[in-house]
Amino acid sequence: MSERETPPDPPDEPRTDSGTDARNEDEADDEDEVSLRRRLARNPRPALVWTAVLAVLLALQFGALLEFVAVTSESVLGAIVRGVLGTFGGGGGNVNATNATNATANVTGGAAGTGLVGQLAAETLFDPLVEFARSVPRLLSRETIPNQGWSTDGGMNGPWRGTFPTNFGVENGLSPALAWGLRAFLVYAYVFVLLAWLWRGYRVFVEHYRYADWTPRDDVVRRLRDHRWGQFGLVIVVMFLTLAVFAPAVSPTTYEQNVLSPYENTLKYFDEGAGEVVEIPVGQANLDTASRGNRDVNVGPLSYDQYGRFHPFGTMSNPGADLFTFMAYGARVSLFVGLLAIGISSFFATVFGLLTAYYKGMVDLSVVVVSDSIQTIPAILLLILLSVVFADHWLSSIYDGGFLIACILGVVYFPGLWRAVRGPAFQVSEQEWVDAARSYGQRSTQTMRKHMLPYILGYLLIYGSLTIGGVIITTAALSFLGIGINPPTPEWGRAVSAGRSYVPTVSWHIAFIPGVLIVLVVTAFNAMGDGIRDAIDPQSDTGEDAATEAAAAGGGG
């Protein structure tokens, strides 16, 4: 184009201050949100169908999910309310929660009145929520598919009464083993169907609503789909989570009958001597069917006891509780401690990682000294010391000691996570866009949050999944030593401790099965972490490409 054809200059526009770029970014974000809404409005059917099916799936077991959240919240927050009111309300008494699944409390000491006020306040606040959650119907429950019944001829071959589907008017029901197996199978099938539908939702988003044809996350997903070792770990982890969340449904018996109040519950069985169906306290039946290393006094895996109850993992030595139910509710404790500990350590690792990478110098040196000081102390020694120091403190009553153990483990494991993200954080802090943000005058907190945090989240995900197995096995080790989680709350390490003297006998299952499950779950978390690491960073590289893909998986892209 010649000079003669040069278009005239555009009319002058009013100039703005340095806040123009920020407003332009906000406007661009708004345009992205509008474009997504427009894409949804242009083709709403796939999203509506997927959302409707998801709502149905969640509604089927919404009561079980709500009960898990309500009971966990009541156990933690209720104990905090009791402890705070007992401590700062003029009390010197001691408030001890007796179990983490029902969170009842006993008040002792000189200030029992104040402790009683805290207990009543906690019950007033949380008990209605728990009762409401338990009243919400769910498709797969013990009431829908009961497995506790009695044989009308005293044998284990039936016919059976009281089991599914006799609750729907059928004359004869399934055997307790088949009824329990059906319920457990349907619960696990439900979870895997739900996860498959969530994956379908991601595919619907990619196919119909994602703006970009390709993102680095696509390569991460592709590598993870081909990683068999990581998939093995993921499947086992999902089964572990299902066991914890749906413990009331997958357990052969209830927690109240098994641990909390066995003598306040009864069961029916056919008494051959009397020739009729009679009732007996569950506690007495548990004592009669305990496994104590003798062939005449032993209920092994996949067997019935003399009262017609089926035990997938057998029974324990004292007080003869069902081992599978003990392990299911113990999984809840392990899950709570593991997630809380990793959450605490990840928080500290993220904060200190960003601060040391951004400010360097004395800030970095101070954190190095603190982390090295923590790592020089043997972890098990520190755990035992703090557990003994806080044994009579109200903090030890929160989730029956699980909260205190999780806090201690969170501090113990934070130096390792911090060192894992320190290198990537330093690398990102040297990038041009971070220097540009500094020269632009952007606040340090905003720079760390927007330009540095997304690039270390992928590494936190990797090393957090690798660390949670260590938290679980450490918690089990403490319970094996008789400290940590307060009895009678189920914990896997306590089961190993209770059965270690029976290993060479016919009651080998008491310690062997929990030990195998601990090893399997810890291995699964490590395998899943390996899969995530190889998917995000297949070359184990700390270069710019690895940081970019870590951002895509951890929160970027």
Image (tube, rainbow, N blue to C red):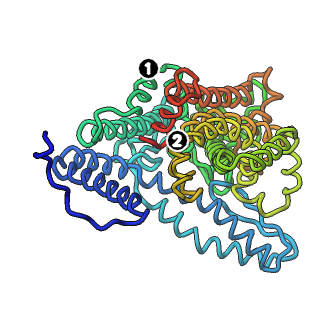
Which residue is painted at 74% across and 26% down in the image? Answer: 507
User: Which residue occupies 80% across, 37% down?
Assistant: 480
Left or right of 364 in this view: 532: left
| Mark drawn on residue 7 | none
At 34% from the left and 39% from the top, the residue drawn is 202
Q: Which mark is residue 226?
A: 1
Tell me where residue 213 sits by quadrant: top left
Please state which of residues 392 and 431 is positioned toward the viewer in this rendering.
431
Q: Quadrant of the C terminus?
A: top left
Q: Which residue is mark 2?
A: 432
Counting from the top left corner in percent of width and height, residue 114 is at 77, 78
Q: Earlier in the sequence, mark 1 or mark 2?
A: 1
Residue 238 horizontal side relative to residue 371, left or right: left
Packing grade of label 2 (10 A; few <14, some 14-19, many >=20) is: few
Name the one closer to the observer, 381 or 123. Answer: 381
Which x, y percent locates residue 534? 53, 24
Rendered location of residue 164, percent (x, y):
41, 41
Q: Residue at x 49, y 26 (%)?
A: 535
- Identity of the amino acid at label 2? Glu
Residue 248: tell me if it is visible.
no
Is 36 positioned to the left or the right of 101 in the image? left
Q: In the rendered image, which quarter contains the N terminus? A: top left
Outermost residue, left side: 5
Tell me the kind of residue under disc 1. Asp
Give the secondary structure at mark 2: helix
Front of the two marks 1 and 2: 2
| Residue 503 coordinates in the image, percent (x, y) | 78, 24
